[in-house]
Image (spheres, rainbow, N blue to C red):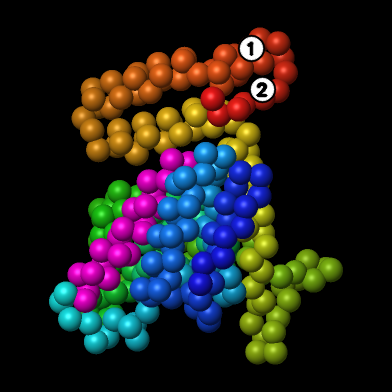
């Protein structure tokens, strides 16, 4: 259900639960195990999360949820929240390459990533109210922090599903790329029902390009920057500034800081070691 690939310090997590990559207990448990292994990888520089097939993640498994009791639902929410918080708290940047449907738990998974790059084929939304429930994997909390309370309330209260262009306009995603196959004339390829054929490659390529760019920077600086941003966001400004100064100063005890500044002065590319 989770496929993991490694590429020069970049971990690619594929959600692979066909046909629509829904989040179930088995998948979420496996995600915990994958993230635990990544937490222990000192050579890790960035992580990319994407889906296989038509969906990024099209929601949680309704067949599993429909008979849940209060206690079952609580455990399921804790499992999902725990996995997404673990993803969010990885010490390195995490990039969502949203290739297709990202509904309910799919939007919540994308929100747990640092940066979201979307295919034009993607759809976003928190449609849980259509099922008589609310988002349970962090949607009521992270969506507000991402796009503001007004837009978040609108999406959660209405259960509306929005396209990638709208998601870009409201700041839910940071980059928008092509999502459908083109022929030699640059025209969209259509299937037998005259629907455009989805192409997942452009969004994954864009995410990998950004991941590689980040991986080439000072790894210890990137990790400290993530701490400063994530922890500082919930602090009063003066405490956030104090945290920033502390993390900034800690980097001056590293070999990477010396290498980076020497390389700048010597007009060469730095050779960072993560030390």
Q: Helix, strand, or loop for circle 1?
A: helix
Disc number for residue 240: none
Identify the residue position indicated by label 1 in the image: 262
Q: Main secondary structure of the magenta part?
A: helix
Q: Which residue lies most toward the top here?
A: 265
Q: Residue 261 location in percent, x, y?
A: 59, 14
Q: How many labels were placed on the picture? A: 2
Disc number for residue 270: 2
Q: Are marks 1 and 2 in contact (CB under 8 Å)?
A: yes
Name the residue located 57 percent from the left edge and 14 percent from the top edge.
Answer: 258
- Classify residue 70 as left or right of residue 84: left
Q: Residue 240 location in percent, x, y?
A: 28, 27
Q: Which residues are magenta?
A: 72-94
- Classify residue 239 as left or right of residue 29: left
Q: Which residue lies most toward the right here?
A: 184
The residues tagged by marks 1 and 2 sit, at their Cα atoms, a distance apart of 8 Å
Name the residue located 53 percent from the left edge and 81 percent from the top edge.
Answer: 19
Q: Quadrant of the C terminus?
A: top right
Where is residue 176, by image quadrant?
Answer: bottom right
Q: In the rendered view, would you say 241 is above or below 33?
A: above
């Amino acid at each position: 259900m989770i496929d993991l690939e490694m590429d020069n310090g970049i971990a690619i997590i594929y959600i692979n639960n066909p046909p629509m990559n829904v989040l179930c207990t088995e998948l979420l448990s496996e995600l915990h195990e994958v993230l635990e292994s990544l937490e222990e990888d000192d050579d890790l520089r960035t992580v990319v999360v994407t889906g296989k097939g038509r969906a990024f993640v099209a929601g949680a498994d309704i067949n599993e949820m429909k008979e849940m009791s209060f206690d079952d639902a609580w455990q399921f929410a804790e499992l999902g929240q725990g996995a997404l918080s673990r993803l969010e708290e990885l010490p390195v940047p995490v990039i969502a390459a949203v290739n297709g449907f990202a509904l309910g738990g799919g939007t919540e998974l994308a929100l747990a990533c640092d940066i979201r790059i979307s295919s034009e084929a993607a759809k976003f939304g928190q449609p849980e109210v259509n099922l008589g429930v609310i988002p349970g994997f962090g949607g009521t909390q992270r969506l507000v922090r991402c796009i503001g309370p007004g837009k978040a309330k609108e999406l959660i209260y209405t259960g509306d599903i929005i396209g990638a262009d709208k998601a870009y306009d409201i700041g839910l995603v940071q980059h928008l790329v092509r999502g459908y196959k083109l022929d030699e004339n640059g025209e969209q390829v259509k299937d037998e029902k005259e629907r455009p054929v989805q192409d997942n490659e452009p969004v994954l390529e864009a995410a990998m390009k950004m991941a590689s760019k980040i991986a080439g920077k000072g790894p210890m600086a990137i990790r400290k920057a993530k701490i400063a941003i994530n922890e500082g966001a919930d602090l009063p400004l003066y405490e956030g500034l104090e945290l920033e100064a502390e993390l900034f100063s800690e980097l001056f005890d590293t070999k990477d800081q010396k290498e980076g500044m020497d390389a700048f002065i010597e007009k060469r590319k730095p050779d960072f070691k993560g030390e």
